[in-house]
Image (cartoon, rainbow, N blue to C red):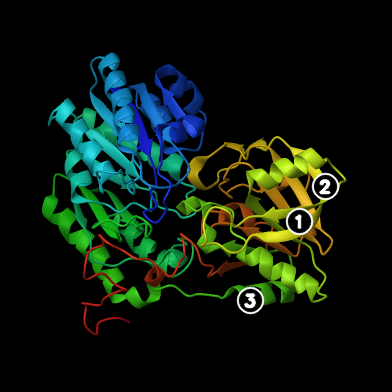
Amino acid sequence: MRVGVAGILHESNSFLRKPTTLDDFRQVTLMEGEAMGRKMLDGHHEISGALVGLGEEGIEAVPLMYAWTTPSGLVTDAALTALLEILWSNLEKAGRLDGLIVCPHGAAISEKHLDMDGYWLGLLRQRVGPTMPIVCTLDAHANVSQAMLDAVNATIVYRSNPHVDQRQRGLEAARLMGRILRKEVRPTQAGVFPGIAINIERQHTPSAPCKPMYDLADAMLKHPGVLSNSIALGFPYSDVPEMGSGFIVVTDNDLPLAQRLAAELADYLISHREEFKGQFTSVDSAVDRALAAKGPVCLLDMGDNVGGGSAGDGTVIAEAMNQRHHAGKKFRAFVAICDPESQASARHAGVGKKLALRIGGKTDDQHGNTLDLTVTVRSLHDGKFTETQVRHGGLRDFDMGPTAIVETDGGLTIQLTSLRTFPTSLLQITSCGLKPEEFQIIVAKGVQAPVAAYAPVCPTLIRVNTPGSTTADMNLLTYQHRRKPLFPFEDVFGNSAK
């Protein structure tokens, strides 16, 4: 048996002006065929799990293509066309296949297709015909559409946020594919989408309110005939009709059971929906709490969330900390800001030199003011590091671009990067010779993604309600395409909320 493995993953933010091009994929991840197989075999990604798992099932894994880039704006039509041409070409070169494991994200949007993943999965189904089994994995932030489910035989969603189970989900997909090809099971799936958008601030799966819901889903897996079930938390920055949370149950040829169990999961969310509304901490309150707590304290900058597509050059928290330095408070703090111009100026000045810089707030007017600071250049780096631990997104190789560490006289250490960097690895700090324990405050530009890396060294983590293109307050976003009614914008469930 031979099974192809392919992935086109993008998390698209509708509220960003800059589109995502083919070059964006090429600069981060665009691999094909054997090169993809060699690179991805030993990794934490779902594709890694699928490649290994197929081998364990005695099935030849056939790597087709894998494309991924940092979350950003809508994918251009030219980029989508080119990516699909690569997929079709490798599909043709592969020869006879008995099945496919596909890995979209579930929250991709192109210029023409609001449901980009449903679109390309549908095209794939047309190409391979109705009988070839297709098992699909999705990110936990998927806005699942019926078109996605209709195009595949079974759908498996990450069960953790931060996403640290991607390899396991790939292994699960491979095991299910093995059972399908051995004709042990005939998967049938159902999805229920209750019209609720879980706030991103509430989407930490190891803690309430998510954990009891996942416990219910885990218990359901013991039900006879259940092959898999999934919770899609949803991605609020993709302005699409499917935006919101969903539940998927895969059974062994028992559609009524799949429908009933998916509805039970949806009913849980409906009855507990008030618990999933965002709880917000202001910038000033967060900084004051961080100064009063045992350090280091991690402040999660939700409005400048790189993992949600933001520019990474927000200055709101840095400005608040700098103001406290001016007021006489003494503490060390760290923040990373993507600012190629300032990085280049610091590099040109050289280590040990003092210079005036205008830092951050340059991409748009949503993420704070450009800061006029006098800094000393402490060190210069190439910005590359490799994470060996399992971290959010399954990423291993990171490239911040040429990077400079600068410091104000007040004690604010700023990491100036040339490329936006997913803050999912503590090596972002330690690879530049910095020690996290020496800072009272560490700012990470994310919501849940940084937690796996930063929680072990930060006794306290505070999610901060900063402004920006990834604001956690969904009421501040102007939607054009979301479904109506949709909780928490509208409540059509009556007085049943707990």
Which quarter of the rendering shows the N terminus? top left
Please give left or right for residue 487 compared with residue 325 in the image: left
Kind of residue at badge 3: Asp
Tell whether label 1 touches label 2 (CB within 8 Å). Answer: yes
The Cα–Cα distance between marks 2 and 3, rounded to whole angstroms, is 28 Å
Q: Residue at x 39, y 75 (%)?
A: 275
Task: Identify residue type, mark 1.
Answer: Thr
Position of 227 relative to 322 (above/below)? above
**The disc label shown at residue 413, or none:** 1
From the top left corner, tell me how far across and down residue 486 is, in percent.
Answer: 26, 69
User: Could you classify mark 3 by the number of other residues whose Cα lies within 10 Å: few (under 14), some (14-19), or many (20 or more)?
Assistant: some
Residue with the mark numbered 2: 378
Instruction: Report the residue at 78% width, 38% height from top.
Output: 348
Tell me the distance, in whole angstroms, between the alpha carbons under discs 2 and 1: 9 Å
Looking at marks 2 and 3 on the same chain, the residue that comes earlier in the sequence is marked by 3
Residue 49 is at least partly visible in this image? no
**Left or right: 116 as drawn, with respect to 402:** left
Residue ranking furthest to the right:
352
Q: Residue at x 14, y 44 (%)?
A: 253
7 and 361: which is toward the camera? 361
Residue 408 at x, y percent in the picture: 80, 59
Q: Secondary structure at mark 1?
A: strand
- Amino acid under disc 2: Arg
Q: Secondary structure at mark 3?
A: helix
In this view, the residue in front, 261 or 488, is: 488
Q: Earlier in the sequence, mark 2 or mark 1?
A: 2
Q: Which residue is mark 3?
A: 284
* Residue placed furthest toward the bottom: 495
Q: Is residue 12 above or below residue 397?
A: below
In this orientation, does residue 107 appear?
A: yes
